[in-house]
Amino acid sequence: MKTIALRLSGISLLILLLTGCSKTDSGVSSTVLKDAIAGSTQNLNNAMTEITSNQAFDLLSVSSSGMTYKSGTVYTANIPLSLIKGVYNYKPLKTTASQTDPLIKFFTQSADPSKMVINMPLAKLKDPRNLRVYLKSDSTLTNNFSMTVSDYHNNYNSYADYDYVNVADISIDKVKAGSLNIKSLVSPTAGINYGSSFAFSNGYTAKYAYASGDTTVSSFAIVKANATLYEEKLLTVKTVKTDNERFGRENTYTLTIGDFKLVRNADHTSQVYLKNVLQPKAVVAMVDAAPTTEPSICHKREIQITFEDGTVTTISSLISKSITDITTLFTSLHDVYFAAYVADWIGYDIFYKR
């Protein structure tokens, strides 16, 4: 499952977009720069506290652990919203069903003219291994989770060829918790264009995008209104035309946290910017704990900044209380499993008349 991101042409244009138009002067004092970075990272920490207080955040931590969804079997399906529209209400079923049995057996269906509405207990969705298992406690659960799908199609023909869209509103205890938007296009000729976002009801949005090619761009961001609280962008270049790896050689990496921006270039030189003004006296050291195809603060990358006065700080120390939760968002937006576990499974059950 993945989102359609715009393909960019030419490395020079990509690098320009990644780094932005930046001014250069002698920079600000170490104290001003340190205070600015500390302020931006504290704003991010505060934002993550608000994001994690939203019940929808727990949904994004649902993983594929122990599940059998989308095995290596090649199959073909063309599932539009018109085929699966309706209201589906979860109803406990006393059965010894296995993980491969149709999920739709656990739902009753009524008509809806334009949308797919799934109502079910939040507790069952948080632990999808028990979706098809009857527990004594199921009789006490209410259908307090609702997913209203307003745009959907799943044109699937193996991992290398599919077109997927899932746009839905999420409610918990009859209160809107957020909105999901997934768009993915994969083809043997055009490659991968993927994007997913989750807009929380308290105004924050987390989003991930990936566009493949000889130059590949991936990005992950947390924003509120027009303010970028956190963003990582990675531009990689394939070393040879026959390279089939998802990512090539790192060309440009950009980290933005509020007013602070760091750019590392292909030659491993780095620049620090404050409000797009170059701070030439700040020295950056970047270390990856282990080789990785998509380096990130969330995944094995550490950034150390030495200021003009000789003091040193690291990004991980400044956002230590938030890294785990940021990583959850970063990981979950690659594959939004909670959406797949209900909408896609029910869709496949209907399509194959199970």
Image (spheres, rainbow, N blue to C red):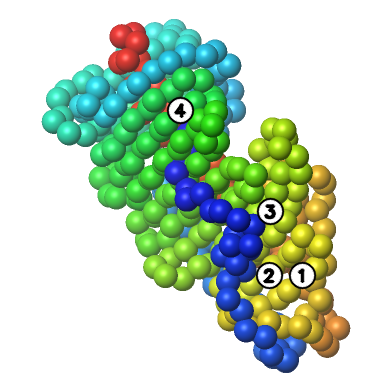
The mark closer to the camera, 2 or 4, is 4
Q: Which label is found at residue 162?
A: 4
- Report the front residue among 350 and 95: 350
- Report the front residue among 80 and 119: 80
Between the C-alphas of marks 3 and 2, the distance is 13 Å
* 178 versus 192 height, above or below: below
Answer with the quarter of the image where residue 341 lies. Answer: top left
Between the C-alphas of marks 2 and 4, the distance is 36 Å
Residue 189 can be seen, yes or no: yes
Amino acid type of disc 4? Tyr
Q: Which residue is mark 3?
A: 296
Residue 304 can be seen, yes or no: no
- Report the front residue among 196 and 37: 196
Q: Earlier in the sequence, mark 3 or mark 2?
A: 2
Q: Which residue is mark 2?
A: 262
Task: Sort mark 1 into few (<14), some (14-19) or many (20+) by Cα contacts within 10 Å.
Answer: some
Q: Which label is found at residue 270?
A: 1
The answer to the question of whether label 3 and label 4 lie on touching residues, with beta carbons closer than 8 A, is no
